Image: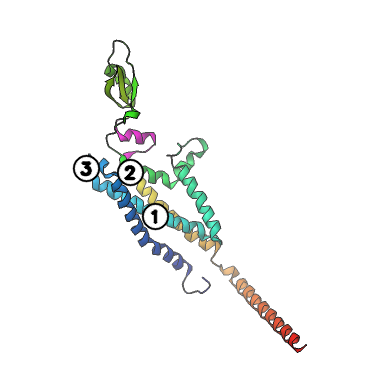
Amino acid sequence: RPSKTFTWWIFLSAQVTAEIPFNFLCATATFFSWYYPIGFYKNASPTKTTAERGALVWLLIVGFFNYTSTFGLACIAGIEHEINGANLAYILFIMSLEFCGILKHPSGFWSFMYRCSPFTYWVASILSAGVGDNVAKCSDKEIVYFPPPEGQTCTEYSSPYQQDYGGYLVDSRDGLCGYCPISDTNSYLVDLKVNYNDRWRDWGIFMSYIGINLIFMYALYYIMRVPKKNNRVQDASALKSADNGHIASQTLTDSSETSEKRE
């Protein structure tokens, strides 16, 4: 800004656009090294949505990288010292992560943070695309065994419960009924307040936070750093006074050194 080579908003825009190609590159590398090795694409095969859900996950990762970069710029835009901007970004990032609905369900006063957090929509969308709309199978450790009442089969006894809460029966063992409490991944997502059908909507809401970051970045920089018309003359006068003071101080120093040499 002091060099006045270009306007302040071009300076900010250049910072944003310079990071976009690298964000795409890093996001693509992250996608291929994470999505396919884990096997998330297999969950989309039964519904024949492999391409659509894979593209959605890639867009989510690209959006995440661009969100973090614009979020950092928004935090530092109106702050003079970078360490203070980093501390602010750290606090806000942790709060968004803590209240996204996965680590802790929204409750009471903090429920508004659940709706405000961008990670609420990012996590919901990536979970829907990664594991949604598929059959779930329990491991041996997750199966619950219980004895049926006398005169009733496992199916007769557990049928009303299954109709209300889902799940499925497995082969009985030693006279005990085996029950898996979850039969499809959508039931698991419902417990996390995630709707599989809202996956694209959630992606769109998350992407809007990038625009919010940019608005805050431009606004904070303009308010906190761009000189206003009312104080430009004052700033120039202060700068001139500082320069005159520096020249006077330098003159006195030179005079003192000359006097010492003469003595």
Q: Residue at x 31, y 31 (%)?
A: 139
* Callout 1–callout 2 Cβ contact below 8 Å: no
Q: Of 140 and 233, which appears nearest the observer?
A: 140
Q: Secondary structure at mark 2?
A: helix
The local crowd at label 1, few if under 14, some if 14 to 19, many if 20 or more residues have their Cα within 10 Å, is some
* Farthest right residue in view: 263
How far apart in space, not on screen, are marks 2 and 3 (Cα)? Answer: 16 Å
Task: Give residue 84's quadrant in the image.
Answer: bottom right
How far across and how far down the image is residue 71, in percent? 46, 55
Task: Name the mark nearer the viewer: 2 or 3.
Answer: 3
Q: What's the amino acid at mark 2?
A: Arg
* Quarter containing the C terminus: bottom right
* Residue pointed to by mark 1: 65
* Residue pointed to by mark 3: 48
User: Of the residues under marks 1 and 2, which one precedes in the sequence?
Assistant: 1
Q: Secondary structure at mark 1?
A: helix
User: Of the residues under marks 1 and 3, which one precedes in the sequence?
Assistant: 3
* Residue pointed to by mark 2: 199
Q: Of 231 and 90, which appears nearest the observer?
A: 90
Task: Give residue 134's quadrant in the image.
Answer: top left
How far across and how far down the image is residue 226, in percent? 53, 66
Q: Relative to residue 207, is residue 263 drawn left or right?
A: right
Counting the numbered discs, the total is 3
Task: Give residue 175's quadrant in the image.
Answer: top left
Q: Which residues are magenta?
A: 183-197
Q: What's the amino acid at mark 1?
A: Phe
Compared with 188, 253 (above or below) is below
Q: Is residue 187 magenta?
A: yes
How far apart in space, not on screen, are marks 1 and 2 (Cα)? Answer: 19 Å
